[in-house]
Amino acid sequence: MSDTIAAIATGGVVSAIGIVRISGPEAIPAADKLFTPKSGVRLTEAIPRRMYYGTLAGPDGNVIDACMCWISRAPDSYTGEDTAEFHCHGSPVVLTEVLRALFAHGVRQARPGEFTKRAFLNSRMDLTQAEAVIDLIEAESPMAVQNAAGQLLGATSVRFEAIYSRLLDILAHFHAVIDYPDEDIEDFQLADYLATLTEAERELSRLYKTHESGLNLVSGVPTAIIGRPNTGKSSLLNALLGYERAIVTPIPGTTRDTVEEKILLGGVLLRMIDTAGLRETRDAVEKLGIERTLRAIAGAELVILVLDGSAPLGDLDYEAICAIPQGIARIAVVNKSDLPGELAEAELIGLGFDFCHISALTGAGIDVLRAKVRELFPALAAPTPGELITNARQANAILRARDGINRAIEAITDTITPDAVLTEVESALSAIGELTGKNLRADATDRIFERFCVGK
């Protein structure tokens, strides 16, 4: 990391402010060559983390912008290196010209995620915190923001580090007894290890179980909107979105393909799929749509059954109900509450449905639906910040660490030789080291940071 890098750290559209970020041993001298503060203070002598106003000029001396600049010195910076930032007017052309001027002074273009990668390599954050950065950038709901921010601040790092430390104590004691037999060191007490291992296994199991909720927090709960034709499924989707995403007509079979959109409902991000109405049909295209409907139901974690409240339950409604697999969260939405009601609520209660009355036409009752979704997914509606594991790589490492600890526990309870316990503890330590980045190969590190955007 002997070279100095730079990148535009804001979006590629016109905005009020645009930021160019620089990091590396020549960051401050390079910025100093371009920027002249009005105060007359050189950036090489500037007070760290204080904004300076001045003019920014290219190598030819032509002024590019009147802007702000600040510096930060190693190791007290985001990357752990000397850094500088230009806060310019947000023209993409201005920002590009700033980059070109920096390149003329030997600075190179930063690669995706390279600033955060340097922060990780310089021990400014561990890998779980680094991965939380991209989760925070890509968050699509307030709860996802809170969870990623919690992880960035070390909510999970603290737990992994505590487990790692306890397992390391076991390993150190084991090696001390083996390597220094003449010293007055307490001999193996495998039963004493059992409590430590059991507690670690319990904590890792708890964290691993949050992964499914974590995936739903980031990607949205897969939700199928189903029902017979003309109950108002597409109208419901449009009402929730606030615009006409799906075509709505009085003609049965209008929706012939699945329409997917993400919606924040009751604080829960839903990946909603509007489906073709379930019925017998000879139309080949509509049949394909119904097949996709059944696949959407099979892959859903929430099914919203839309019923026409102005008519009694019919055979097609019961067929739709029968298509919902057991164990899936479900809500019955009785639509058309603006019309005289004919659907008997007792039938829905008898079928075990939680339900609410709405009018997709007027929007009445939508708040009740929001509340019911929130009740079904409380962990997603109000998660403890940083508690949900959203990353598949982390989940896999947690699982391997937990399995290693379980094998160590089995070795103790089956009175297998202590070296077998040691082997499994080492396996668990290695997996936890991968979580935080203690034992990660360089190529694996590169692959992780490829997800990031340039400038971060």
Image: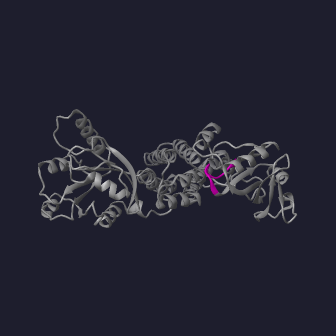
Q: Is residue 183 above or below residue 444?
A: below
The stretch of residues the image draws in magenta is: 7-15
Residue at the image position 21 percent from the left and 65 percent from the top: 338
Magenta segment: does it hold 101? no
Left/right of residue 191 with respect to residue 308 in the rendered view: right
Rendered location of residue 327, percent (x, y): 26, 51
Residue 96 visible in rendering: yes
- Specify the color scheme: one colour
Judge by depth and name the residue closer to the eye, 409 or 46: 46
Rendered location of residue 57, percent (x, y): 81, 52
Left/right of residue 437 with respect to residue 223 in the rendered view: right
Left/right of residue 40 with respect to residue 14 in the rendered view: right
Q: Quadrant of the N terminus?
A: top right
Rendered location of residue 328, percent (x, y): 28, 51
Rendered location of residue 117, percent (x, y): 66, 47
Residue 328 visible in rendering: no
Judge by depth and name the residue closer to the eye, 90 or 435: 90
Q: Which secondary structure is most common in the magenta stretch?
A: loop
Which of the 4 quarters of the picture holds residue 47? bottom right
Q: Residue furthest top?
A: 284
Magenta segment: does it hold 11? yes
Q: How many marks?
A: 0
Residue at the image position 45 percent from the left and 47 percent from the top: 406
